[in-house]
Image: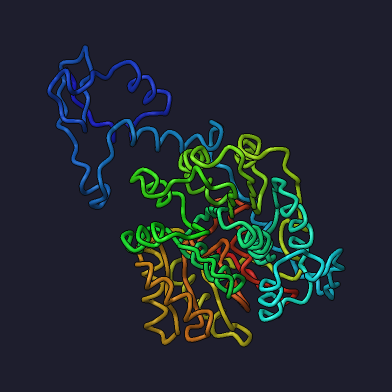
């Protein structure tokens, strides 16, 4: 009988051979008293010592062979089973900005035209909103009519106020109404709650942010005290439902903000579970920057005859100057990055990396060279991430290095440069990343290292 590790198979056999071995030659370890890391092959007298996985994967948690095989097999075949990973055309990262004076949007309505409570109109004036932005102009009347809405809009278009304003008005006129807002990240959820506090000031309406990384006991206490808005990430909302703390059967207003991002992050099952717990007579709003097949399926399943509204004008903003930087070695790559950061005009710079440890290593390297830099990723504590983002917004630090957790939804004003230090996985991710610069008609620069 031959003993062989699945990791050796991955390295030394073709995909077809691996598949044949996996499906036809393995006996389940429970029937043989075998370690889960190896499998017996029949009809062979040769014995090979089991291979340790510790050194090869540098101490990372060991996967079961089937999981390891599935990941290797899927990576090699690419999306939809096509052999070979889909390549990104680097020429799409090169586009000179078109310096065109931005024409002001001609609104159909004024904020005074909307039948909001007087307190809301007062808060709108305090916040300096002059006239509705395109997404607000199109969606607010439909929301007030009680219709489901699908809004296709990039970040920074004013969609948060587009759904908060009418829902605040609805709740002020009927205190029994409850609103649930789902967002992909802690930072976006906190940002929405901050916007809610400003727009609902003086109304005696309150919201709670329910996200991982912050004390759940405080969140439970606030929910039980009675709040009109629950704003959270799918994982924490699901946890609170299962703890029987959050009863969504009375929630008739639901917002899926950055729905495509939530799906990308693997929250589909949680989203389906959560929506299934809300009132069947709910009004559902869905906002997304892309219209992927997965988003379409979600919309078809949970939105009733939605009004489709799009305010996206092309893949990337015309006022973003996009280019690539070619490098051959890690040392050359770091030197060219430092040259970019020292150039005049490099004000507020957002750098993206693919992995958490890569964020930390680049922060250390740049800090040693005297740059005011910080990094955020999923392993940072929520309070630390909030503090770093606040420092970046207030120019206490000039360079922020992040994983894609910061690529969507966050309101970071006046970013002059977005740098893809690592090549994004796909073009949609690229579009989401560079959308942090060139906002409100200002010029932006997007650079990608290749």
Which of the 4 image quarters holds residue 321? Answer: bottom right
Q: Nearer the viewer, residue 83 or 197?
A: 197
What is the x, y in percent for residue 344? 62, 87
Which of the 4 image quarters holds residue 409? Answer: bottom right
Q: Residue at x 52, y 59 (%)?
A: 228
**Residue 428 visible in the picture:** yes
Q: Residue at x 48, y 72 (%)?
A: 332
Tell whether 7 sits left or right of 247. left
Q: How many marks?
A: 0
Single out the residue that lies furthest toward the top: 43
Tell whether 132 sits left or right of 360. right
Quadrant assignment for the C terminus: bottom right
Quadrant assignment for the N terminus: top left
Tell whether 24 sits left or right of 77. left
What is the x, y in percent for residue 364? 36, 76
Compared to 244, does 144 lie above or below? below
**Residue 431 visible in the picture:** no
Q: Nearer the viewer, residue 74 or 402?
A: 402
What is the x, y in percent for residue 338? 50, 79
Q: Residue at x 22, y 42 (%)?
A: 53
Compared to 255, does 384 lie above or below? below
Q: Residue at x 63, y 79 (%)?
A: 414
Single out the residue that lies furthest toward the left: 33
């Amino acid at each position: 009988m031959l003993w062989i590790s699945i990791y050796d198979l991955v390295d030394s056999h073709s995909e077809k051979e691996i598949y044949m071995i996996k499906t036809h030659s393995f006996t389940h370890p429970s029937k043989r008293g075998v370690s889960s890391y190896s499998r017996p092959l029949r009809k062979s007298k040769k014995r090979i010592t089991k291979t340790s996985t510790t050194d090869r994967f540098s101490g990372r948690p060991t996967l079961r062979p089937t999981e390891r095989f599935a990941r290797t097999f899927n990576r090699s075949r690419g999306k939809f089973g096509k052999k070979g990973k889909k390549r990104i055309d680097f020429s799409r990262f090169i586009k000179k900005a078109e310096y065109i004076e931005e024409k002001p949007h001609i609104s159909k309505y004024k904020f005074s035209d909307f039948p909001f409570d007087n307190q809301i109109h007062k808060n709108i004036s305090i916040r300096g909103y002059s006239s509705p932005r395109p997404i607000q102009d199109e969606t607010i009347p439909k929301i007030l009519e009680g219709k489901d809405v699908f809004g296709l809009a990039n970040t920074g278009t004013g969609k948060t106020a587009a759904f908060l304003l009418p829902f605040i008005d609805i709740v002020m006129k009927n205190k029994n109404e409850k609103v649930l807002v789902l967002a992909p990240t802690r930072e976006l959820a906190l940002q929405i709650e901050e916007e809610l506090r400003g727009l609902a000031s003086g109304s005696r309406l309150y919201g709670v942010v329910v996200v991982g990384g912050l004390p759940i006991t405080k969140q439970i206490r606030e929910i039980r005290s009675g709040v009109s808005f629950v704003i959270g990430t799918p994982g924490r909302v699901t946890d609170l439902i299962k703890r029987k703390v959050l009863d969504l059967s009375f929630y008739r207003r639901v917002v899926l903000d950055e729905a495509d991002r939530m799906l990308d992050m693997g929250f589909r099952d949680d989203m389906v579970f959560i929506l299934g717990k809300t009132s069947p007579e709910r009004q559902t709003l869905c906002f997304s920057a892309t219209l992927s097949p997965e988003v379409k399926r979600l919309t078809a399943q949970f939105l009733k005859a939605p009004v489709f509204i799009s305010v996206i004008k092309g893949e990337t903003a015309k006022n973003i100057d996009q280019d690539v930087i070619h490098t051959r070695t890690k040392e050359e790559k770091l030197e060219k990055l430092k040259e970019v950061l020292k150039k005049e005009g490099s004000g507020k710079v957002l750098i993206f990396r693919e992995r958490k440890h890569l964020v930390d290593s680049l922060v250390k390297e740049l800090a040693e060279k005297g740059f005011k830099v910080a990094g955020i990723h999923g392993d940072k504590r929520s309070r630390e991430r909030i503090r770093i983002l606040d420092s970046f917004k207030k120019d206490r630090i000039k360079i922020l290095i992040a994983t894609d957790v910061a690529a969507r939804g966050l309101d970071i004003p006046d970013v002059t440069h977005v740098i893809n230090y690592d090549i994004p996985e796909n073009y949609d991710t690229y579009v989401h990343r560079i959308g942090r610069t060139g906002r409100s008609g200002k010029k932006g620069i997007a650079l990608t290292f290749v």
